[in-house]
Image (cartoon, grey):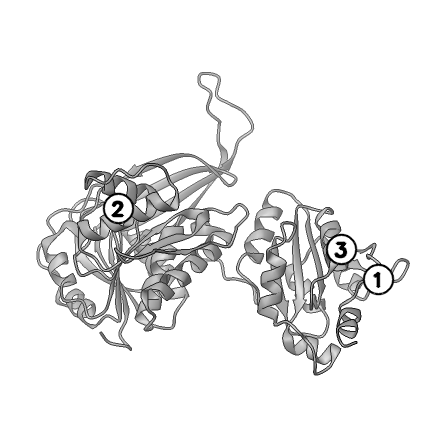
Amino acid sequence: MSATGPLVVVGDALLDVDLVGTASRLTPDAPVPVVEDVEARERPGGAALAAVIAARATRREVVLVTPMADDADADRLRALLAGRVRLVEIPATGGTAVKRRVRVGEHSVARIDSGAPVAGLGALPAEAADVVRRAAAVLVADYGRGTTTDPAVRAVLAEAGGPIVWDPHPRGADPVPHARLVTPNGAEAARVAAAAGVAAEGDGLAAVGARAEALIRHWGVGAVAVTLGARGALLSYGEGAPMVVPATPVTGGDPCGAGDSFAAAAALALADGAVTGEAVAAAVASAGAFVARGGASAWDVVAPNVVAEPGAAGVIARVRAAGGTVVATGGCFDLLHPGHVATLRAARGLGDCLVVCINSDDSVRRLKGPSRPLVTAADRARVLEALEFVDAVVVFDEDTPAEVIGRLRPDVWAKGGDYAGADLPEAAVLRRWGGQAVVLPYLDGHSTTALVERSRV
């Protein structure tokens, strides 16, 4: 393994196309929507999406080794990848695989697949074999198009320089036996386990754990992490108690590509020297953040320059796309108390999401003195996110929230306290885009400062 080597993604590259339109009526001959005003949005898919996701998350070189046909769809895919990842092409037969999703708003109504499976790759180019041998880690993104079944590919994977993460597919090949980590989803794990003679009933953790153990024996791999969507992931080494990594809840979002994000993050973590459990924990967090940002549909959207917990940008984008109202509020929130809770609950009632902007540790120290904060920004954010009426948390480093308000551009800025009739300092910022600053009743007799003083008595 080369610590400075590239992350190499091996697998089936697809061209994904979203045909996004509007629908207000059904066809007269069938109960299906008429989709109008269609806009085509192209993006890398399959192994190509996994490579792009990885490249955006690391300074390490990312190399995509994939069969590429000689057609117009392949040219469009090459253009999407240019400047993002290094492409090492394997000569391919058959046309480029294309997946087209017909979508109305955030909802898919149909998918149209085209492109023949890759067959007869023959000997790999020397460049492909070389990068796999030098890899800090290898991610195999199997999309059932023939790459992982090719003997030449499997022979090269046997010489991989770093740990292998294998993201399987129902129509793909079994992982190579020396893979460090295999990442099936719940349905894939159940299907393979049943074929191996293990038919654990239900989708509880006991059943998932039994399937994971069966897959390790069946495949002869080091570990299996079964991804469970909003429930997180279960990691098994084949014996002993499995590790369960819960996911941070995400409201809405497009889950397309979440598995690629999970596998890419796990491979990057292993490339950087993480143990398998650490890699899976990082992968769960990465997949949740990916969905919150908009999923595969937002693959090329640059996140705003805000120091934020995963999800703020995605929450705001989804609410605005649906014509909803974005509400934000702010403060130090050092020792959460009933006054805070009452204000936050009231603020959430003003719109369709609530983003809480909290002062960083340095900002609190400047405002409250050297003995504050009592709780770090990371922990304050975790406590706030646990509240059902808080949709996202943003941490800002300035003394006032004016700059972060300008970046987030909420429709409503809610302030708790005795400010009725006063012109709030934030109001001028809100006026730039027609937003409104409002004052909410504050639960009297509660403040962090008072709590601190009473604790010292």
Comparing 218 with 54, the one in front is 218
- Residue at label 2? 169
Dot in front, 1 or 3:
1
Q: Position of residue 311 (x, y in %)?
A: 54, 56
Check the image and name the residue furthest to the bottom: 370
Q: Secondary structure at mark 1?
A: loop
| Residue 255 visible in image | no
Instruction: Tell me: residue 12, above or below residue 161.
Output: above
- Residue at label 1? 445
For badge 1, the amino acid type reads Gly
Q: Position of residue 179 (x, y in %)?
A: 21, 60
- Say which residue appears at 49% left-offset and 51% top-offset: 294
For badge 2, the amino acid type reads His
The quarter holding residue 24 reads top right
Q: Which of the two labelled residues, at mark 3 and mark 2, occupies the earlier sequence position?
A: 2
Instruction: Tell me: residue 201, above or below residue 17.
Output: above
Q: Position of residue 176 (x, y in %)?
A: 17, 56
